[in-house]
């Protein structure tokens, strides 16, 4: 299974009054992990937008296991969990060292910018389709 790792230092502004990372910041970390995965695989989201497509989140889940605090360095582990030609599901795990802190997933669909209609990646974005297919295949091995 191909897992992509991204490291982030927790900033003070990401914490709440209790000194714990505010729950919504995990979603930002998921986005950082997803962006790193795309970049590593040679996929350019800026170019995708220039071509008239975007990939909005249609579902997101987070489960918190252990608190993360200011000064911690988190490791975001990201992988493609599922892909069906239209939707892609990313899975995330957040660690501080070897301490498991959170897990989550996000589901995205590719749509045309001009009318927000979903598109088949195989027909409209063959390079993206090829990459997602390869990552899902690696997950099955």
Image (cartoon, helix red, strand yellow):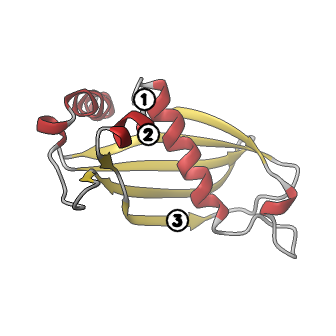
- State how far apart marks 3 and 2 are (Cα): 15 Å
Q: Residue at x 42, y 25 (%)?
A: 41
Image quadrant containing the N terminus: top left
Q: Residue furthest bottom?
A: 17
Specify which label sits upstream in the sequence, 3 or 2. Answer: 3
User: For numbered disc 3, what is the local secondary structure?
Assistant: strand
Q: How crowded is mark 1: few (under 14 residues within 10 Å), some or many (20 or more)?
A: some
Instruction: Using the image, tell me which numbered label, if any, was put on residue 36.
Output: none
Q: How crowded is mark 3: few (under 14 residues within 10 Å), some or many (20 or more)?
A: some
The picture places residue 49, in percent across and down from the top left corner, at 37, 43
- State how far apart marks 1 and 2 are (Cα): 6 Å
User: For numbered disc 1, what is the local secondary structure?
Assistant: loop
Instruction: Using the image, tell me which numbered label, if any, was put on residue 62.
Output: 3
Specify which label sits upstream in the sequence, 1 or 2. Answer: 1
| Residue beneath disc 1 | 2
Residue 3 seen by the camera: no
Tell me whether circle 1 and circle 2 mark residues in contact (CB < 8 Å).
Answer: yes
The picture places residue 29, in percent across and down from the top left corner, at 62, 51
- State how far apart marks 1 and 3 are (Cα): 21 Å
Is 18 placed left or right of 81 in the picture?
A: right
Image quadrant containing the C terminus: top left
| Residue beneath disc 2 | 79
**Image quadrant of residue 52?**
top left
Tell me whether circle 1 and circle 3 mark residues in contact (CB < 8 Å).
Answer: no
Specify which label sits upstream in the sequence, 1 or 3. Answer: 1
Is 78 placed left or right of 49 in the picture?
A: right
Q: How many labels does the image show?
A: 3
User: For numbered disc 2, what is the local secondary structure?
Assistant: strand
**Image quadrant of residue 113?**
bottom left
Q: Residue at x 25, y 30 (%)?
A: 137
Q: How crowded is mark 2: few (under 14 residues within 10 Å), some or many (20 or more)?
A: many
């Amino acid at each position: 299974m191909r897992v992509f790792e991204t490291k982030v230092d927790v900033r003070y502004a990401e914490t709440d009054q209790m000194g714990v990372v505010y729950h919504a910041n995990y979603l930002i970390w998921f986005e950082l992990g997803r962006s790193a995965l795309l970049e590593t695989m040679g996929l350019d989201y800026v170019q995708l937008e220039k071509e008239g497509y975007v990939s909005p989140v249609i579902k997101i889940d987070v489960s918190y296991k252990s608190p993360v605090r200011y000064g911690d360095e988190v490791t975001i582990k990201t992988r493609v969990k599922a892909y069906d030609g239209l939707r892609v599901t990313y899975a995330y795990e957040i660690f501080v060292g070897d301490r498991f802190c959170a897990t989550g997933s996000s589901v995205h669909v590719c749509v045309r910018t001009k009318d927000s209609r979903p598109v088949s990646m195989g027909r409209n974005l063959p390079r993206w389709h090829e990459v997602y297919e390869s990552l899902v295949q690696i997950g099955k091995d």
